[in-house]
Image: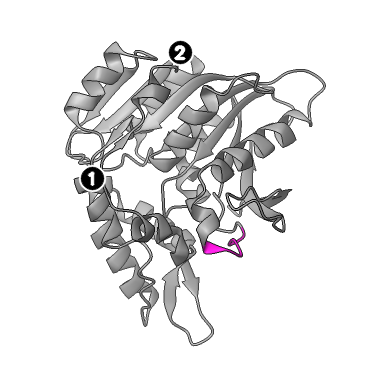
Amino acid sequence: MKIPVKRLLVPTQSGDGQKKEPHYIAYTDWGDPQNPHVVICVHGLTRNCRDFDYLARVLESDCRVICVDVVGRGQSDWLEHAHDYDYYPLYLSDAMSLVAHIQSQYDKGITLEWVGISMGGLIGMILAIQPNVLVPIKKLVLSDIGPLIPAVALRRIADYVGKDPRFDSFEAFKNYMKAISVSFGPLTEEQWNHMAIHSAHQYEDGSYGFRYDPRIAISFKEHEIQDIYLWEQWDQLKVPTLVLRGMQSDVLTIETAAQMQARGAKAKVVELPGVGHAPMIMDDQQIQIVRDFILN
Protein backbone atom coordinates (compact mmCIF):
# COMPACT_ATOMS: atom_id res chain seq x y z
CA MET A 1 0.00 0.00 0.00
CA LYS A 2 1.39 3.39 -1.00
CA ILE A 3 1.42 5.80 1.93
CA PRO A 4 1.13 9.49 1.05
CA VAL A 5 3.84 11.70 2.49
CA LYS A 6 2.91 15.20 3.66
CA ARG A 7 5.31 18.11 4.07
CA LEU A 8 5.34 20.96 6.57
CA LEU A 9 7.44 24.13 6.23
CA VAL A 10 9.04 25.02 9.57
CA PRO A 11 11.49 27.73 10.70
CA THR A 12 15.17 26.84 10.99
CA GLN A 13 16.40 27.51 14.51
CA SER A 14 20.11 28.28 14.51
CA GLY A 15 22.71 28.60 17.23
CA ASP A 16 24.75 31.23 15.39
CA GLY A 17 22.07 33.91 15.52
CA GLN A 18 21.81 34.09 11.74
CA LYS A 19 18.45 34.08 9.99
CA LYS A 20 18.15 30.85 8.00
CA GLU A 21 15.79 29.73 5.27
CA PRO A 22 12.93 27.55 6.57
CA HIS A 23 12.97 23.84 5.79
CA TYR A 24 10.39 21.15 5.10
CA ILE A 25 9.84 18.14 7.31
CA ALA A 26 8.00 15.15 5.88
CA TYR A 27 5.54 12.87 7.67
CA THR A 28 3.03 10.11 7.06
CA ASP A 29 -0.50 10.48 8.42
CA TRP A 30 -2.42 7.33 9.37
CA GLY A 31 -5.98 6.85 10.59
CA ASP A 32 -8.97 9.19 10.84
CA PRO A 33 -7.77 12.81 10.50
CA GLN A 34 -10.61 13.85 12.84
CA ASN A 35 -9.62 11.45 15.60
CA PRO A 36 -8.38 13.65 18.50
CA HIS A 37 -6.28 10.79 19.92
CA VAL A 38 -2.94 11.50 18.21
CA VAL A 39 0.27 9.46 18.43
CA ILE A 40 3.47 10.99 17.04
CA CYS A 41 6.26 8.55 16.20
CA VAL A 42 9.88 9.63 15.75
CA HIS A 43 12.73 7.42 14.53
CA GLY A 44 16.38 6.96 15.50
CA LEU A 45 19.51 8.82 14.42
CA THR A 46 19.86 7.61 10.81
CA ARG A 47 16.44 6.06 10.31
CA ASN A 48 13.17 7.37 8.85
CA CYS A 49 9.43 7.51 9.44
CA ARG A 50 8.66 4.37 7.44
CA ASP A 51 10.12 2.25 10.25
CA PHE A 52 6.76 2.82 11.96
CA ASP A 53 4.55 1.44 9.18
CA TYR A 54 3.98 -1.81 11.08
CA LEU A 55 3.01 -0.05 14.31
CA ALA A 56 0.87 2.55 12.54
CA ARG A 57 -1.19 -0.11 10.74
CA VAL A 58 -2.12 -1.62 14.11
CA LEU A 59 -2.84 1.71 15.83
CA GLU A 60 -4.68 3.54 13.06
CA SER A 61 -8.11 2.05 13.86
CA ASP A 62 -7.92 3.63 17.34
CA CYS A 63 -5.61 6.63 16.86
CA ARG A 64 -4.40 9.12 14.31
CA VAL A 65 -0.72 8.26 13.87
CA ILE A 66 1.80 10.84 12.62
CA CYS A 67 5.24 9.46 11.73
CA VAL A 68 7.82 12.13 10.98
CA ASP A 69 11.14 12.23 9.14
CA VAL A 70 13.53 14.28 11.29
CA VAL A 71 15.29 17.02 9.30
CA GLY A 72 18.16 15.61 7.24
CA ARG A 73 16.57 12.16 7.14
CA GLY A 74 14.11 10.33 4.90
CA GLN A 75 12.15 12.73 2.73
CA SER A 76 12.69 15.81 4.92
CA ASP A 77 14.98 18.59 3.70
CA TRP A 78 18.71 18.61 4.28
CA LEU A 79 19.90 21.71 6.13
CA GLU A 80 21.97 24.24 4.22
CA HIS A 81 24.52 24.59 7.03
CA ALA A 82 25.94 21.40 8.54
CA HIS A 83 26.55 22.97 11.95
CA ASP A 84 22.81 23.48 12.41
CA TYR A 85 22.50 19.68 12.89
CA ASP A 86 24.58 20.18 16.03
CA TYR A 87 22.12 22.74 17.46
CA TYR A 88 19.77 20.55 19.45
CA PRO A 89 17.01 23.18 20.02
CA LEU A 90 16.37 22.85 16.27
CA TYR A 91 14.92 19.37 16.77
CA LEU A 92 12.71 20.56 19.62
CA SER A 93 11.54 23.52 17.51
CA ASP A 94 10.62 21.21 14.62
CA ALA A 95 8.68 18.96 16.99
CA MET A 96 6.77 21.86 18.49
CA SER A 97 5.94 23.19 15.00
CA LEU A 98 4.58 19.78 13.99
CA VAL A 99 2.44 19.51 17.14
CA ALA A 100 1.06 23.02 16.58
CA HIS A 101 0.28 22.17 12.95
CA ILE A 102 -1.62 19.02 13.91
CA GLN A 103 -3.53 20.79 16.72
CA SER A 104 -4.54 23.58 14.31
CA GLN A 105 -6.58 21.03 12.34
CA TYR A 106 -9.01 20.48 15.25
CA ASP A 107 -11.74 22.55 16.86
CA LYS A 108 -10.90 21.08 20.28
CA GLY A 109 -7.80 19.95 22.08
CA ILE A 110 -6.12 16.72 21.06
CA THR A 111 -4.72 13.98 23.28
CA LEU A 112 -1.06 13.57 22.38
CA GLU A 113 1.19 10.58 22.95
CA TRP A 114 4.75 10.10 21.75
CA VAL A 115 6.64 7.03 20.57
CA GLY A 116 10.36 7.57 20.06
CA ILE A 117 13.12 5.17 19.10
CA SER A 118 16.53 6.25 20.42
CA MET A 119 16.97 9.87 19.21
CA GLY A 120 13.22 10.16 18.69
CA GLY A 121 12.73 9.24 22.33
CA LEU A 122 15.12 11.96 23.48
CA ILE A 123 13.19 14.55 21.47
CA GLY A 124 9.96 13.37 23.12
CA MET A 125 11.49 13.43 26.58
CA ILE A 126 12.68 17.02 26.19
CA LEU A 127 9.37 18.11 24.65
CA ALA A 128 7.44 16.53 27.52
CA ILE A 129 9.18 18.70 30.14
CA GLN A 130 8.74 22.03 28.34
CA PRO A 131 6.70 24.55 30.35
CA ASN A 132 3.48 25.94 28.90
CA VAL A 133 3.47 23.69 25.82
CA LEU A 134 0.53 24.04 23.45
CA VAL A 135 -0.31 20.33 23.75
CA PRO A 136 1.14 18.35 26.66
CA ILE A 137 2.32 14.78 26.08
CA LYS A 138 0.05 12.41 28.02
CA LYS A 139 2.12 9.24 27.58
CA LEU A 140 5.67 8.61 26.39
CA VAL A 141 7.21 5.49 24.87
CA LEU A 142 11.01 5.32 24.72
CA SER A 143 12.72 2.57 22.76
CA ASP A 144 16.17 1.89 24.20
CA ILE A 145 17.16 5.36 25.27
CA GLY A 146 17.57 7.04 28.62
CA PRO A 147 19.22 9.90 30.50
CA LEU A 148 22.68 8.31 30.43
CA ILE A 149 24.21 7.43 27.06
CA PRO A 150 27.62 5.77 27.43
CA ALA A 151 30.56 7.00 25.39
CA VAL A 152 31.36 3.43 24.32
CA ALA A 153 27.99 3.21 22.53
CA LEU A 154 28.45 6.63 20.94
CA ARG A 155 31.86 5.56 19.59
CA ARG A 156 30.27 2.47 18.01
CA ILE A 157 27.65 4.62 16.31
CA ALA A 158 30.28 7.13 15.18
CA ASP A 159 32.09 4.31 13.36
CA TYR A 160 29.39 4.17 10.67
CA VAL A 161 27.34 7.39 10.79
CA GLY A 162 28.20 9.87 8.07
CA LYS A 163 30.52 7.65 6.02
CA ASP A 164 28.17 7.77 3.00
CA PRO A 165 29.12 4.42 1.39
CA ARG A 166 27.88 3.62 -2.12
CA PHE A 167 26.87 0.20 -3.46
CA ASP A 168 26.54 -1.24 -6.95
CA SER A 169 23.21 -2.94 -6.23
CA PHE A 170 20.23 -2.71 -3.92
CA GLU A 171 21.06 -6.15 -2.50
CA ALA A 172 24.57 -5.01 -1.59
CA PHE A 173 23.10 -1.93 0.10
CA LYS A 174 20.59 -4.03 2.02
CA ASN A 175 23.25 -6.48 3.19
CA TYR A 176 25.39 -3.61 4.50
CA MET A 177 22.41 -2.03 6.24
CA LYS A 178 21.63 -5.37 7.90
CA ALA A 179 25.25 -5.77 9.01
CA ILE A 180 25.41 -2.41 10.78
CA SER A 181 21.88 -2.84 12.16
CA VAL A 182 22.17 -6.37 13.55
CA SER A 183 21.50 -5.02 17.06
CA PHE A 184 17.90 -4.27 15.99
CA GLY A 185 17.21 -7.93 16.68
CA PRO A 186 15.74 -10.85 14.72
CA LEU A 187 13.68 -9.05 12.07
CA THR A 188 12.09 -10.97 9.21
CA GLU A 189 13.45 -10.74 5.69
CA GLU A 190 10.31 -8.84 4.71
CA GLN A 191 10.97 -6.30 7.46
CA TRP A 192 14.64 -5.90 6.45
CA ASN A 193 13.55 -5.41 2.86
CA HIS A 194 10.98 -2.80 3.90
CA MET A 195 13.61 -0.91 5.87
CA ALA A 196 16.12 -1.09 3.02
CA ILE A 197 13.64 0.16 0.42
CA HIS A 198 12.87 3.24 2.49
CA SER A 199 16.49 3.79 3.58
CA ALA A 200 18.04 3.66 0.11
CA HIS A 201 18.62 6.42 -2.40
CA GLN A 202 19.57 5.53 -5.97
CA TYR A 203 21.95 7.98 -7.60
CA GLU A 204 22.11 8.93 -11.27
CA ASP A 205 25.00 6.54 -11.84
CA GLY A 206 22.85 3.64 -10.61
CA SER A 207 24.59 3.22 -7.28
CA TYR A 208 22.78 3.08 -3.94
CA GLY A 209 23.44 5.02 -0.74
CA PHE A 210 21.62 6.02 2.42
CA ARG A 211 18.72 8.46 2.34
CA TYR A 212 20.10 10.79 4.98
CA ASP A 213 22.49 13.71 5.01
CA PRO A 214 25.92 12.35 6.05
CA ARG A 215 26.58 15.70 7.70
CA ILE A 216 24.27 14.70 10.58
CA ALA A 217 27.43 13.09 11.98
CA ILE A 218 28.95 16.51 12.68
CA SER A 219 28.32 16.19 16.43
CA PHE A 220 30.61 13.15 16.57
CA LYS A 221 33.32 14.97 14.63
CA GLU A 222 33.18 18.34 16.36
CA HIS A 223 33.08 17.19 19.99
CA GLU A 224 35.03 14.79 22.14
CA ILE A 225 32.90 11.68 22.57
CA GLN A 226 32.00 11.22 26.23
CA ASP A 227 29.05 10.06 28.30
CA ILE A 228 25.89 12.12 27.86
CA TYR A 229 24.06 12.89 31.11
CA LEU A 230 20.42 14.00 31.03
CA TRP A 231 19.39 13.07 34.56
CA GLU A 232 18.40 16.65 35.33
CA GLN A 233 15.87 16.51 32.48
CA TRP A 234 14.72 13.00 33.40
CA ASP A 235 14.00 14.00 36.98
CA GLN A 236 11.59 16.67 35.66
CA LEU A 237 9.62 14.09 33.68
CA LYS A 238 6.30 13.16 35.29
CA VAL A 239 4.21 11.68 32.45
CA PRO A 240 3.51 7.91 32.33
CA THR A 241 6.46 6.42 30.47
CA LEU A 242 7.11 3.00 28.93
CA VAL A 243 10.70 2.01 28.20
CA LEU A 244 11.58 -0.84 25.87
CA ARG A 245 15.12 -2.05 26.55
CA GLY A 246 17.04 -4.43 24.34
CA MET A 247 18.75 -6.78 26.78
CA GLN A 248 21.94 -6.66 24.70
CA SER A 249 21.90 -2.86 24.41
CA ASP A 250 25.06 -0.83 24.89
CA VAL A 251 23.06 2.45 24.82
CA LEU A 252 20.60 1.80 27.64
CA THR A 253 22.33 -0.17 30.38
CA ILE A 254 20.51 -2.27 32.93
CA GLU A 255 21.76 0.07 35.67
CA THR A 256 20.36 3.15 33.93
CA ALA A 257 17.03 1.41 33.28
CA ALA A 258 16.77 0.53 36.98
CA GLN A 259 17.28 4.18 37.96
CA MET A 260 14.65 5.23 35.39
CA GLN A 261 12.16 3.08 37.29
CA ALA A 262 12.97 4.82 40.57
CA ARG A 263 13.44 8.45 39.46
CA GLY A 264 11.57 11.05 37.42
CA ALA A 265 8.74 9.44 35.51
CA LYS A 266 9.27 6.13 37.37
CA ALA A 267 9.02 4.36 34.06
CA LYS A 268 7.68 0.93 33.31
CA VAL A 269 10.61 -0.98 31.76
CA VAL A 270 10.15 -4.01 29.51
CA GLU A 271 13.27 -6.07 28.77
CA LEU A 272 13.45 -7.69 25.33
CA PRO A 273 15.78 -10.69 24.90
CA GLY A 274 17.76 -11.14 21.71
CA VAL A 275 17.68 -7.41 20.95
CA GLY A 276 20.31 -4.70 21.34
CA HIS A 277 19.98 -1.08 20.28
CA ALA A 278 17.24 -0.57 19.43
CA PRO A 279 13.90 -2.39 19.44
CA MET A 280 12.26 -1.27 16.19
CA ILE A 281 8.63 -1.94 17.25
CA MET A 282 8.03 -4.00 14.11
CA ASP A 283 7.34 -7.46 15.50
CA ASP A 284 3.98 -8.46 16.95
CA GLN A 285 5.22 -8.71 20.55
CA GLN A 286 6.74 -5.22 20.68
CA ILE A 287 3.76 -3.70 18.86
CA GLN A 288 1.34 -5.30 21.33
CA ILE A 289 3.32 -3.97 24.30
CA VAL A 290 3.19 -0.44 22.91
CA ARG A 291 -0.45 -0.70 21.87
CA ASP A 292 -1.54 -1.90 25.31
CA PHE A 293 0.33 0.98 26.98
CA ILE A 294 -1.16 3.60 24.68
CA LEU A 295 -4.75 2.35 24.69
CA ASN A 296 -5.11 1.34 28.34
- The residue located at (23%, 26%) in the rendering is 256
What whole-number distance in Å separates the C-alpha atoms at marks 2 and 1? 27 Å
Looking at the picture, how far across and down is residue 183, in whole percent?
23, 48
Residue 183 visible in the displayed image: yes
Q: Is residue 78 magenta?
A: yes
Res 147 quadrant in image: top left
Position of 83 relative to 128 (above/below)? below
Looking at the picture, how far across and down is residue 116, in whole percent?
45, 35
Q: Is residue 143 magenta?
A: no
Looking at the picture, how far across and down is residue 60, in whole percent?
58, 32
Q: Secondary structure at mark 1?
A: helix
Q: Pick out the residue farthest to the bottom.
A: 205
Characterize the magenta stretch by its predominant secondary structure: loop
Position of 202 relative to 258 (above/below)? below
Q: Secondary structure at mark 2?
A: loop
- The residue located at (60%, 56%) in the rendering is 76
Q: Which mark is residue 151?
A: 1
Residue type at mark 1? Ala
Q: Which residues are magenta?
A: 77-82
- The residue located at (45%, 47%) in the rendering is 51
Quick one: label 2, few (<14), some, or many (20+) residues within 10 Å?
A: some
Looking at the picture, how far across and down is residue 25, in whole percent?
64, 51
2 or 1: tag closer to the N-terminus: 1
What residue did someone put label 2 on?
Answer: 238
**In front here: 184 or 237?**
237
Between label 2 and label 1, give the one nearer the viewer: 1
The answer to whether 22 appears left or right of 288 in the picture is right
